[in-house]
Amino acid sequence: MEPDWKCLARLVRSHSATFYLGSLLFPKAERQGAWAVYAACRMGDEAVDGPGGGWEALSAWWEGVERAYAGRPLAEWEVGLAWALERWAIPLEAFAHMKEGFLTDLGPVRLKTEAELLRYCYQVGGTVGRMMAAVAGGEGAEGEAIALGQAMQLTNILRDVGEDLGRNRVYLPEALLARYGVCLEDLRAGRITPGYRDLMAHLEAQARALYRTGLKGLPRLRVGRAAIALAALQYQGILDKLKRLGYQNLSRRAHLKPWERLWLLPEAYRLARMGE
């Protein structure tokens, strides 16, 4: 059964301009595979945060994943995933670990340590890296792909602190909050204290280190180096903007304008050629 690629492309474009723009730099088959993977992951996210989200919706999403792996897809995103699975060895374990992260999101979320934060970033971000490495033919690059996915998810967390607070989710670890003298009352009141900026700078540095590790895997990808590089550069651009804003992420959301995304294309191609 052939997936409805126009439908899947619209889903990707409507939910993530970053991912969609990067996907356009893949060859056709791998681009479609990237859309299929993204759609499957996005449906899991919607099962948690979308209308009617919750345990039952998440269980229904997991059943869809299992149907795709069994070759009996029903929903359009399942058809896309089944199509991708016929072509690439995308590990079911990655989806299982992603489900664990989504279960955390059912919340309320309170993480205790930085290790727990990085584990969560693996579950909902590093797993995507594993899937995309399979599509891009990244043999031997799974570790770097995981690091890149973790970096992107950590960037999302730093961008969305205020938004997540409104959902009773605190991904900033309690140990780091205590170390930097940050209390939830200040965050809920929208107060950006010097300690909070120091905490943000610490986690930004962690994300930067993960990007450096992740991008080292580009030379081992068979295809899509520029696509992966562009996605990483866009997310790093969000970190750049967040820093310029003085980590004002409690009442606003750092984002890139379309022209800022396009401006990154030459650098993405430069990174893609490294190691050739």
Image (cartoon, helix red, strand yellow):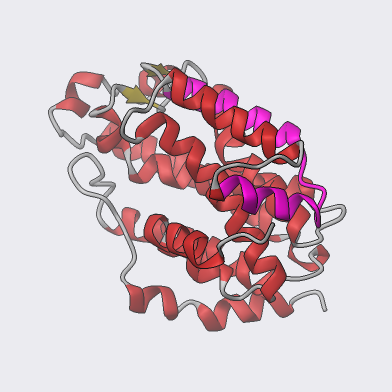
Residue at 61% in and 59% down: 3
Q: Residue at x 31, y 70 (%)?
A: 257
- Residue 1 higher or lower than 163, as above or below: below
Q: Residue furthest right?
A: 140
Where is residue 123 shown, x and y percent of the image?
Answer: 60, 32
Is residue 267 inside the magenta stretch?
no
Q: Provide residue 232's location: percent of width, then percent of height.
A: 55, 61
Is residue 191 visible in the rendered image? The answer is yes
Q: Is residue 98 magenta?
A: yes
Q: Residue at x 79, y 68 (%)?
A: 219
Q: Is residue 174 left or right of residue 196?
A: right
In which quadrant is the N terminus drawn? bottom right
Residue 238 on image: x %, y %: 39, 58
Query: Which of 103 and 118 lies nearest the eye of the viewer?
Result: 103
Tell me, yes or no, if residue 117 can be seen here.
no
In the picture provided, is 120 more to the left or to the right than 105? right
Residue 141, x across and y down, in percent? 80, 53
| Residue 58, above or below 161 | above
Q: How many marks?
A: 0
Looking at the rendering, which quadrant does residue 231 occupy? bottom right
> Which image quadrant: the C terminus?
bottom right
Q: Residue furthest left?
A: 189
Which residue occupies the extreme bottom position in the image? Answer: 266
In the drawing, does residue 123 fall left or right of residue 221? left
Q: Please provide the residue range marked out in magenta.
A: 77-105
Q: Residue 139 sits in which quadrant?
A: bottom right
| Main secondary structure type of the part rendered in magenta | helix
Q: Nearer the viewer, residue 126 or 195?
A: 126
> What residue do we see at 28% from left, 47% from top?
247
Q: Nearer the viewer, residue 174 or 7?
A: 7
| 136, above or below 141, in the image | below
